[in-house]
Amino acid sequence: MEVIYEDGVLRPLEPLPFAEKERLTATVTSKPAPLKKVPFNPRTQEFEWLRVHGADLAIEGDLLVGVGDRVGSVMDQARAKGIALPLVHYVPEEPRLPFAGW
């Protein structure tokens, strides 16, 4: 069943088939917001910016909208600035070369 949360109370959107004051157990899950349709973006500006600057970051157009060492934190920074789908670029660290000693 669908409910709405208002003023600290879950209110059903339709009548329920239960007796008044009947005790029930409920499982609550939130419904994700529907995705907005985003127009295709070839990311030309972003790729040019990366070519010139290079880094682990999120960009939108020629704006830097997030920097960090985790995708989640970079995306959070971008979303806080109103950017839903920035270009996220990750450059992995160079692996250490094996060393066997002399």
Image (spheres, rainbow, N blue to C red):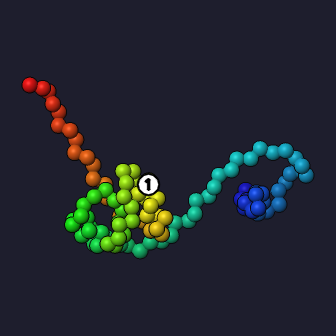
Residue 40 vs residue 64, the one in the foreground:
64
| Residue 99 to residue 80: above or below | above
- For label 1, the SS is helix
Q: Residue at x 79, y 62 (%)?
A: 14
Relative placement, left or right, of 82 versus 5 is left
Residue 53, by quadrant, is bottom left
Residue that carries the numbered disc 1 in the rendered image: 73
The amino acid marked with disc number 1 is: Ser
Using residue 68 as the reference point, say whether residue 20 is left or right of it: right
Q: Can you give x and y, in whole percent of width and height, for residue 7 in the image?
A: 76, 61
- Residue 41, image x, y percentages: 35, 72
Q: Position of residue 91 (x, y in %)?
A: 27, 53
Q: Identify the residue shown where x is 25% and y is 46%.
A: 93
Q: Residue at x 58, y 63 (%)?
A: 33
Please say whether residue 54 is visible from this viewpoint.
yes
Q: Residue furthest top?
A: 102
Dot 1 crowding, Cα within 10 Å, few <14, some 14–19, many 20+:
few
Q: Quadrant of the N terminus?
A: bottom right
Q: Specify the farthest residue to the right.
A: 20
| Residue ID at (12%, 26%) | 101
In the displayed structure, does residue 77 sit left or right of residue 2?
left
77 or 22, which lies in front? 77
Q: Is residue 59 left or right of residue 2?
A: left
Residue 88 seen by the camera = no
